[in-house]
């Protein structure tokens, strides 16, 4: 008899799991809170692990690639002077630049017409049984139905409904970095910079980073530090950022970027939270992706981890087809070292994006210069 899995969340982790489970003979059903599929999104540098996972899922070749031919990054100072720094997208083996929506579009290509997807639907109750899970679903018109599944996968993001229903409130698992971020596409090129130019305007506790993309507007990433990130996440981003960055408007770059923010609804504005849990599963309910671990945007591995997790789950279920407990334990054993490795450095990496002190700001600028000179030296040596 075909086993059924309910996947909550039509994001990268959810669609990756659907592809992997479908290959193993499962019948996945995806529910999504939104009324339609999200598109666009912010810049992602897909590194080697992410590229390998996308290839294993069969979606790398259909994924739109947006890496500019000629990338240069600039550190722009408050007085308007600029200095070349190391390319922030090239930390490891030439990652490819994509939008979050490019990854989701490729994954959608892998499930379209093969996996049932229901929009405007959320879980309101989940009851674990010995061999099955009973889930009450609510559609956006208020109608409720109860269905039975062999596995429920919560891939519904950092503020996961599945996690709240089965494991407890967000506060029990959130580990704040003490920062806020706002990411969105710019509507126009940054004046005074070439196509393919990225830039960073950094000051103590606040930073704007612009990541260039080929054929699409650059992504703007505002980051700032705050003692009350959860309180800040409920505010309107436009006046909040305008106030915080008011005296850092170098050559009008900040104000023009904020004008673009005020004209779009395609933005992410939220506190930066890692999720840490002793276990990612309870009975036949499993958390995956940001719901389970949230590596944050600072890690550069969030999207990759979602695809890796989906693929790992499929492999674990294939290895233990008649033992759900063993399969979920195998999944955790495979994913935990990867997650721990990247969570370990998130607080440090946040200093590169938004320095917390004058010393951090100075050290960050010195580090970028050292890395740039090192890369230039190695490039000359190999040529």
Image (cartoon, grey):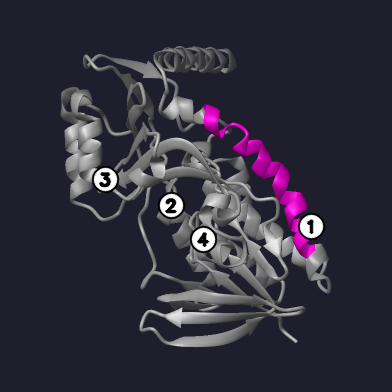
The residue tagged 1 is 330
* Residue 44 in sight: no
Q: Does residue 96 sit above or below 106 in this rendering?
A: above
Q: Nearer the viewer, mark 3 or mark 2?
A: 3
How far is disc 3 from disc 2 in space, using C-alphas?
Answer: 21 Å
Q: Secondary structure at mark 1?
A: helix
Tag 3–tag 2 contact (CB < 8 Å)? no
The residue tagged 3 is 237
Q: Residue at x 36, y 35 (%)?
A: 223
Q: Counting residues from the N terminus, which is met first, the one under dot 4 or under dot 1? A: 4
Q: Tag count in the figure? A: 4
Tag 2–tag 1 contact (CB < 8 Å)? no
Residue 346: within the magenta?
A: yes
How far is disc 3 from disc 4 in space, using C-alphas?
Answer: 22 Å
Which of 343/161 is in front?
161
Which of 4/137 is in front?
137
The residue tagged 2 is 100
Residue 330 screen position, x and y as percent? 79, 57
């Amino acid at each position: 008899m075909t086993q059924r899995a309910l996947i909550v969340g039509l994001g990268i982790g959810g669609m990756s799991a659907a592809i992997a489970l479908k290959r193993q003979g499962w019948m996945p059903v995806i529910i999504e809170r939104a009324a339609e599929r999200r598109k666009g999104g912010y810049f992602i540098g897909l590194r080697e692990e992410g590229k390998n996972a996308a290839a294993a899922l069969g979606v790398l070749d259909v994924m739109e690639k947006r890496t500019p031919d000629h990338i240069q990054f600039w550190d722009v100072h408050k007085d308007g002077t600029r200095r070349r720094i190391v390319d922030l997208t090239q930390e490891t083996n030439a990652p490819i630049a994509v939008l979050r929506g490019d990854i989701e579009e490729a994954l959608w290509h892998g499930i379209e017409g093969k996996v049932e997807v229901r929009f405007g639907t959320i879980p309101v109750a989940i009851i674990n049984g010995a061999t099955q899970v009973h889930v009450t679903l609510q559609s956006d018109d208020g109608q409720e139905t109860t269905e039975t599944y062999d596995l429920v996968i919560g891939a519904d993001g950092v503020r996961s409904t599945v996690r709240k229903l089965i494991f407890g409130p967000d506060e029990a698992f959130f580990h704040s970095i003490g920062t806020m971020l706002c990411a969105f596409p710019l509507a126009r090129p940054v004046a005074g910079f070439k196509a393919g130019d990225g830039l960073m305007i950094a000051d103590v506790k606040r930073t704007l980073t612009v990541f260039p993309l080929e054929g699409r507007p650059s992504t703007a990433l505002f980051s700032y530090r705050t003692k009350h990130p959860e309180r800040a996440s409920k505010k309107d981003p436009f006046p909040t950022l305008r106030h915080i960055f008011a005296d850092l408007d170098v050559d009008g770059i900040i104000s023009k970027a904020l004008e673009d923010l005020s004209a779009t609804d395609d933005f992410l504005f939220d506190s930066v939270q890692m999720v840490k849990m002793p276990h990612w599963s309870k009975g036949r309910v499993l958390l995956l992706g940001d719901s389970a671990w949230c590596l944050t945007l600072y890690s550069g591995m969030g999207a990759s981890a979602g695809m890796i997790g989906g693929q790992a789950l499929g492999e674990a279920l294939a290895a233990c087809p008649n033992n759900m407990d063993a399969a979920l334990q195998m999944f955790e054993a495979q994913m935990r070292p990867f997650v721990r490795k990247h969570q370990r450095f998130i607080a440090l990496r946040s200093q590169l994006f938004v320095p917390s002190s004058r010393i951090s700001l100075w050290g960050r600028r010195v580090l970028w210069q050292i890395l740039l000179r090192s890369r230039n030296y190695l490039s000359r040596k190999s040529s």
